[in-house]
Amino acid sequence: MAEAAVLSAVKILSELVIRNAGYLHGVEEQVNWLKGELEMMQCFLKDAAEKQSENESIGKWISDIRELAHDADDVIESFILKFDASRSNFGAFGKLIHLPSNLYHLSIVGNEINSIKAKLEEIERSRVRYGIQNLCEMRAESSRSSEDAGEVEWRRRLSPWQKDKHVVGLERDVQLLLDKAILDGSGGLTVATIVGMGGIGKSTLAKKVYNHSGVAKRFDVCAWVVVSNEFKPKDIVKELMPQILGTRENKLAVLETMEKLSLTSIEEMLHERLRGKRYFVVLDDLWDNKHWESLASVFPDEGRGSRLLITSRNQDIVKHAYVHKIKLLDSDESWELLKKTAFIDSGNEYKCPQDLKSIGEKILKKCDGLPLAITVVGGLLVDKTPSKAKWEKVLNEINSHLGTKESKVSKILDLSYRNLSPELKACFLSLSLFKEDATIRARKLVQVWVAQGLIKQEKGESYLDELINRNMVRVKDMSKNETVKSCQIHDLIRELSIIKAKEETSFEILREDSKSGWSLHKPRNRAIYCSSETFIHSIDKNKHLRSLFFHADGDKKFDVDPSYWKSFELLRILDFEDFKLEVVPDTISELTGLRYLGLRNTMIRNLPRSLGRLKKLEVLDIARTRHSLQVPDVIWEMDSLSHLYMHHHFICETPLRLDTLKNLHSLSYIKMDYLILEHLTQITSLRKLGISLFSTKKVEWSSPLKSLVRVTQLKVVGMLTKVPSAAYFPPNITCLTLVRTTIEEDPMPVLEKLPKLVCLKFKMYAYSGQEMVISSKGFPKLQVLILHTMENLKNIRLLGLRGGIMPLKRLEIYKCPCLNQLPEKLRSMATIVNK
């Protein structure tokens, strides 16, 4: 298929016409013609895909369309960047002063479109010769309700929670593991392994065991780490360490210390931290027994009854371990799982129309009891009004040839991909850029889609929800307002995204130890896995790239020749998250088309002043950098910024000017020492604000906040001692988070007066007092209350609170050891989570 490539080209052509119509004299008609032709080609691609197995020439026809769409994308994107640069350089009179240059660029665009037009005419003649039909017209004439726009929109509105609880047939496995290996009462260190093929539910079973109430009561420390095929012992140890540290320990300081130590030293650190504790650790997705052998010595065996639980496809991963082999689902369990994934919950009943049952049974025979295959098919079948025609269509499309279970599930996954809309296909292909087993922030994923030009920001959440509802993406964490916070993809689905991205978007993965790199003629999306300090690169194959992700394949620091960046003419996304990058060179300013720059958790110490030249940048993420970061006062020049993520420990020579950022939607964490408070009131699009009070001077932070009428989420980090009056908070705030504020006076008499507050979170010593008091008229809309690590809190009192006044639905209590009892009225209001 070439739908993703054509879609991208159509969108960028639309952007050109809308934004620059007045400057296209002489080529506007050609641009509109090209856009119309590419839109028409989208209608032929689905029929071509279905026929290419019958005729190899059709595969070549599809490849030609893909290549042509990429060429059109390059031509138009290059023109936009050059044209915008000329307007920027010559100010308001750029159109007149720079007219000769503009005419020159227009002439080039016209010639290149004419060249593309000639190729399109040949492609059209081939289409007629191959008998490829316009399925858009056929679909418009069809009465199938599942294809209409209302149906698509309905699917996107489904709550991800509906797909987050589909577990069938594991109850016996959970109990068996608990009884035989985890809670069996034996002393010493016991190792248990869950083994089975890909997609059978090993990690799901491990999670059920890990979250069991008996485990939390039995063990002093619980930790979970994903190992995966890209095994890095130091990363494994570094992920385990924060999970076993005490609440009062500075986790960031410990991690910074670990960065400077050898693998042997940090393994000894972890070993010492685990000594004297009864621990339970899950090593998820361990591939090789050599990997286990390199980790085994980290875990002390002191006779205290500690446990390790390992998931693996390899039954012989650990010698002398208790082995639990997951079985495939039987016919009843398979049917139960299909019902749960294909039908909407109606009062805890998943009803299947009688005329669909026999078709469903035939579909399940193709799935062979493999849970991943069943859930993906269920996501394909889910419908507002289930129809026999659709179920029969899915049955007919599933390839029923014999083979290994993995090959069968691959066919089903491929079918699910082919039934996505062009927009969803393009979004799904972006998953190939992320590392195996990565926890992907939903916010970042949507921002990548937007930066690639695939969707509009306001549609991002619904597109992610639809991929989740189709069981192609799984939820990792949900926020308290029931939106997806982070997600993951199964390794088999990630493999599918990589295969399809290589076909559709000229995606490539480069590794320094592989000679297969640099093979593509015009790569457009690239993930680079680096394992050394130097990086050998090819400049001549970068000018077509749109997305570039760097991943650490080792533990060494990384740098690259500054001239490298000059070769990326059309780059939109550059991501270094979790990478040991030390220097951001001035030449990064050459990337004038950049929309997304990810520098989170890197080792940089300075941002170059030239960064201000990135006029199209929409996302700048410099959060959690591992050193204090020097930030020059140039952010105000990036007037397209929508999201700015900073860290508490950045440094500025002067306060940052931000009043020009009219498009800024999210700002965190801005240190109050370096903020001109009045500028906040001029950021008219601001919705989410995080402020840091780790200051060198006392700052009156609250007074300008009351004028931020559009801010709905506020997070405050750092010493506060006392909350200001409710009148000083943003009037429409719905979510407030306080972290390490160490408030001494009870904040509830103030905060309960916030009229629209839905979610209130106290985290990590936010309140140092012993009692909280809530009045009968307090918190008229509060639904979620989180109390996290408040070691002095002993009591919560409710003054005459009547049912229905405070609509609390969820109360979460973590590490509040003195809070032993709660009022019965509070217990009756909410689901209580106590850890």
Image: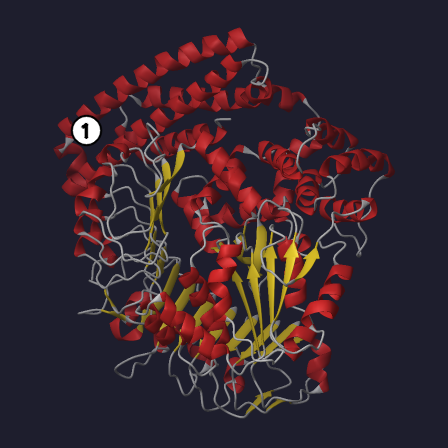
Residue occupying the point 32% across, 70% down: 261
Residue 452 seen in the current view: yes
Label 1 neighbourhood size at 10 Å, few (<14), some (14-19), many (20+)?
many
Quadrant position of the C terminus in the picture: bottom right
Measuring from the top left, give residue 91's x and y in whole percent.
17, 43
* Quadrant position of residue 358: top right
* 152 vs 143: above or below: below
Instruction: Give residue 811's position: percent from left, percent from top.
Output: 63, 76
Residue 448 located left or right of residue 177: left
Q: Position of residue 499 (x, y in %)?
A: 49, 35
Task: Look at the image and name its color scheme.
Answer: secondary structure
**What residue sits 84% from the left and 40% below the top?**
353
In the image, residue 587 lies at what x, y percent? 18, 47
Judge left or right: residue 783 versus residue 535: right
Disc 1 target residue = 102
Q: Quadrant of residue 279?
A: bottom right
Q: Amino acid at mark 1?
A: Asn
Of 606 and 775, nearer the camera is 606
